[in-house]
Amino acid sequence: MTEKSKVSEQSVNEAVRKAKKDYGVSETLAPSDLNSLLDILSQSVRDYSQQPAVTSLGNTLSYKELDRLSTAFAAYLQQHTNLKQGDKLAIQMPSLSQYLVVAYGVFKAGLVAVNINPLYTEDELDYQFNHADVKAVVVFDKFLPVVEAVREKTPIEYVFVTSPFDLHPPIKRTLMSVVLKLLGKAVPCGKAIPLRTALDVETHNFTPANLSSDDMALLQYTGGTTGVSKPAIISHGNMVSVTRQGSEMLQLASAELGKERIVSPLPLYHIYAFALSITTGVHLGAHTLLIPNPRDINGFVKLMRKWPGSIFSGLNTLFVALIEHKDFSKVDFSSLKITLSGGSALAEATGGYWKDITGCEICNAYGLTEASPVVSFSPPGANKSGSVGIAVANTELRIADAEGQPLAVDEHGEIWVKGPQVMQGYLDFPEETAKTVTEDGWLKTGDVGSVDSDGFLFIHDRQKDLIIVSGFNVYPNEIESVVSHHPDITYCAVIGVPDDHSGEAVKLFLVSANPDLTEDDVRAFCSEKLARYKWPTYVEFRDELPLSNVGKVLRRELRDN
């Protein structure tokens, strides 16, 4: 490292340390006797035994019930299967209370959870089941046929199937089963083991697995910072660290132990929701409302009117959909004190509309699967415009140039992260691991960012999404943020396309509710707020934009099509 690089890194680190001191974030968390996710659950069962832990589809489990049911599932795995510690069990279901029961049951049995998108196709399941050597799967009944179609081509030995009302009281469960059959919506289990069967076993002879912080907790598939989908190895130590880091930041944002109500609409198979609802929420002793189908905005808003929360998590597309709903302003927001945004860039206009309606500012956060997933957070009072906050405890940042040398404050480069939440690597992808995590533990995020003199982190874009127009760097996020302020534009996305004159040109895709809006109107709006080389050369109107299952706009699909 050159002397200039040492000074550059020192300036960034000094700014980050100053921010932590100014806003009460620990430089280093105090030592803890929490070694695994089982310790987190045990602590909350001890402190909040009779308090509600999770609600879905109108049914609530207390912390004591969550503990009892997860122990029953673990006992079944231990006593009625040949699965052994370290084996992989996939969870393939929407956000239901069963997710928490199964996840903690998996950990109690010493197994590894593999979070799987329930909408995956046969080819996608075939790849992930085989690559991760998945020995068992718990699948929502609606998606059982897809699992059965690939089962014989995979290592899977046990298939458990769960239905929507499996955790409801017996009478209601039986009644709803009859109703589903009459409506033709009941799915036969076939050869699969009903989850209820596994939850009804005796547990007096059960012995929980002895887990250390180094034991693998999750395999979380991701596109990663480069290339094909691959599983990040997330240890119990990683998850305990990110849980404690997240808990501290939420408490700085006024969260209180044992008193919060979290509204969690994002799917639990996504690491953002998993870390908030299944680990951090449990650590806080919170009561979490799970939303199995947040795309049903009418039903979602009705539920919010009945169930006012104090913490809400979402991302830009979901915030926009809610803001535009006619009844959203009728929700009682008097108890809402923290709104979290993560998973994709938050448009500044969206944050403003949300605060106007709810009275609660959106706290930006930044992370990625490989960081389990939290890197930075903006508690209220530290919500600088355009920033994703300050680094969480035990976390260092580096802004690196193309050679990996540290840059100074306000300089743009790749964001590198070091901390106890950084993954152990990618399973069976040693070359990709070596490209992503340095020998001394720095995670190369693939995101272009900067740290200002106050220690706040800014994300400018993904390296792969950077557009170079006549030698100038153009960041799609910046253009999207500007365009999203136009009152007639609902969603937008920007990509670079080849151009004979400038090398690349900016192409803007947008969705608008105003049929009279024209390309010239959009360009005129951009001309007032952006340098000329950032103006969109091409503007394409769409009825909708391709979104991932968690609501991110898929620029890749726009480029490919």
Image (cartoon, rainbow, N blue to C red):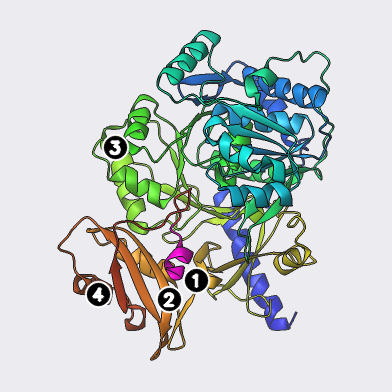
* Residue 559 in magenta stretch: yes
Three-letter code for the amino acid on which mark 4 is drawn? Arg
Question: Disc 2 on helix, strand or loop?
Answer: strand
Q: Around disc 1, counting alpha carbons within 10 Å, would you say few (fewer than 14), some (14 to 19), or many (20 or more)?
A: some
Instruction: Judge from the rendering whether residue 337 lies leftward or rightward of residue 164; answer left or right.
Output: left
Q: Is residue 388 visible?
A: yes
Counting residues from the start of the chain, the first of labels 2 and 4 encountered is 2
Number of the label disc, if any, that sits on residue 465: 1
Q: Quadrant of the C terminus?
A: bottom left
Spatial CA distance of label 1 from label 2 is 8 Å
The answer to whether mark 2 and mark 4 are in CB contact below 8 A is: no
Counting residues from the start of the chain, the first of labels 1 and 3 encountered is 3
Number of the label disc, if any, that sits on residue 328: 3
Three-letter code for the amino acid on which mark 1 is drawn? Asp
Question: Disc 4 on helix, strand or loop?
Answer: helix
The x and y percentages for residue 11 are: 63, 71
Q: Nearer the viewer, residue 126 or 279?
A: 126
Number of the label disc, if any, that sits on residue 523: 4
